[in-house]
Amino acid sequence: MRLHEAGALLAAECARYAAMGWMRGTSGNLSVVLSRDPLRLAVTASGLDKGEMTASDVAEIDASGAPVRPNQPTPSAEAGLHGRIASVSGAGAVVHVHALAPVLAAERWPNAVHLRNLEMLKGFGRKADDWVSIPVVQNSQDMTVLGDAFESGYRADTPALIVARHGLYVWGSDLYQARHRTECLEWLLRFIIET
């Protein structure tokens, strides 16, 4: 996939999440894998209103989150975590949104959020009667620290991570699968908070 094509997809997804209230202000970021060897990702640029993004508002990064092209927008400060998730999980896309339900759930269950016997788990890629544990890690401005925390709790069958008092990371084979998983997980988290 070319960078401009990835940028168009990322801009459309950002507009969707912004309309849902999950990317308020300039918060949140998305990425999609451009190549595997070496690992390269297109990630949304830093400091922009995600509801107004264009196909040019992306940066190409390596697995560590470092920009690889000159004269491109500044990548999100969280680009390193996107690279780490894509590298460890094999994901084709990573979604990071600031939906409220995951943050509230992490306040109530600070180590992990447990889900079970909910039909919507199917949309998250699991069976309705599975016991699913979404890891919660403490927030840090250091993406290596967050990446280490992600990797220590990583499970191949649970494509999500909640960062306490921050937001939600969900990944999938592409942006659409990551979106569907994000939307279903947000519903599941709202359910357990409200019940």
Image (tube, helix red, strand yellow):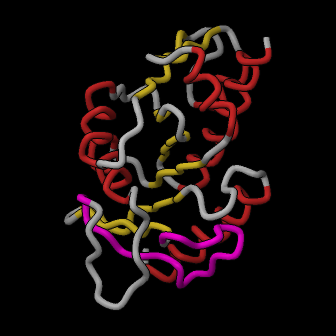
Going by the picture, which residue comes out furthest to the left?
Answer: 38
Could you tell whether 163 is left or right of 54 in the image? left
Total number of numbered discs in the rendering: 0
The image quadrant that residue 38 belongs to is bottom left
Q: Position of residue 95 (x, y in %)?
A: 53, 51
Q: Residue at x 60, y 32 (%)?
A: 103
Residue 152 magenta-drawn? no
Q: Quadrant of the C terminus?
A: top right
Q: Residue at x 53, y 40 (%)?
A: 166
**Camera-side residue: 174 or 42?**
42
Taking 124 as reference, is 183 above or below it? below
Residue 51 magenta-drawn? yes
Taking 126 as reference, is 175 above or below it? below
Q: Main secondary structure of the magenta part?
A: loop
Could you tell whether 23 is left or right of 132 in the image? right
Could you tell whether 87 is left or right of 117 in the image? left
Q: Position of residue 13 (x, y in %)?
A: 65, 62
Taking 60 as reference, is 4 above or below it? below
Q: Position of residue 55 (x, y in %)?
A: 57, 81
Q: Position of residue 71 (x, y in %)?
A: 35, 91
Q: Residue at x 49, y 45 (%)?
A: 172
**Magenta-highlighted residues:** 46-64
Q: Quadrant of the N terminus?
A: bottom left
The image quadrant that residue 156 belongs to is top left
Going by the picture, which residue comes out furthest to the bottom?
Answer: 71
**Camera-side residue: 191 or 175?**
191
Q: Residue at x 53, y 84 (%)?
A: 56
**Camera-side residue: 188 or 121?**
188
